Image (cartoon, helix red, strand yellow):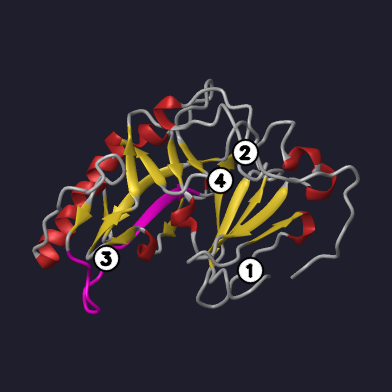
Amino acid sequence: MTGKPIALKGFAFGCGLKNEGFQFSENMRENIIVGVHGLGLGPRSFISQQSNEIKGRFSYCLAADSKLSYMHFGDDAQISGDATREVKMIAMNNLNKYHVYLKGVSVDGVRISIDPSIFKLDPIIYTKGFIIDSGSPYTYLARSAFNPIKDSVVKYFREKYGWEPKPPLDLQTYDLCYATYPSDVQKFPSMSFHFAGIRRQGEVDWVMNNKYLFEKIDEGFCMTIFSINDPGPCLFGAHQQINFNILIDLVKGHLSFVPQICHDVSF
């Protein structure tokens, strides 16, 4: 679906070559920049300045392998599924950032024991919780949440294939790596994030595409979920959003998603 072109008076679009105040995790501080594509919630953002046309509604679908990705705004932002791809909807708090309510994580079908308070939004300073952020390349979890997930992944590979982790080549980047890449008959573990549904309607499972939970490095691979110092905030990054059509409705306060091969269609 593609809407009719519209003219935006006095509109200029470009990129910054020298930006300041753009830091995350334990170094996060007040950030006046309005986002990688101006999708922030402040008065300077593209979303705010074009609010009459956008109506608090936009969608995006991040394609794999550097192929073209698409964004849609306003009435043109739509989402649909089919008999095998169900559109799911989760609650969102967008008073400051795009916070979604993560309740837990499962690895290989087993729910991990994680203190859910680590994902709880801090309503005063907004620097704690679980934020969906397409400007972050990967997912970052507070260490008290990351470590149990890492332990479960290590247990999976040890019990399934007898593999043990190897020290990452870049200790500043990867937290978990292996020297062997799975063959055609070997599999990465499944992983699901359990989110709060809308209007307190229980939990909604976001089943990750496990192809994008791990990255091939030389003859082995590394996990593309990383740890940061407690208490976070935790970030749900772009790599784990690949091949999902995601629609954000700021007026209704919810996020919808559905699996989608993003480079196949322009919607």
Where does the image place residue 11, in percent across and percent down from the top left? Answer: 84, 44
Circle nearer the N terminus (1, 2): 2
3D distance between C-alphas at marks 4 and 2: 35 Å
Dot 4 and dot 3 residues touching (CB under 8 Å): no
Residue denoted by label 1: 80
**SS for dot 3:** loop
Q: Amino acid at mark 2?
A: Leu
- Numbered circle sitting on residue 17: 2
Q: Amino acid at mark 4?
A: Ala
Residue denoted by label 3: 188
3D distance between C-alphas at marks 4 and 3: 29 Å
Is residue 193 something one can see in this rendering?
yes
**Left or right, 237 with reference to 12:** left
**SS for dot 1:** loop
Magenta-highlighted residues? 180-196
Where does the image place residue 202, in percent across and percent down from the top left? Answer: 47, 50
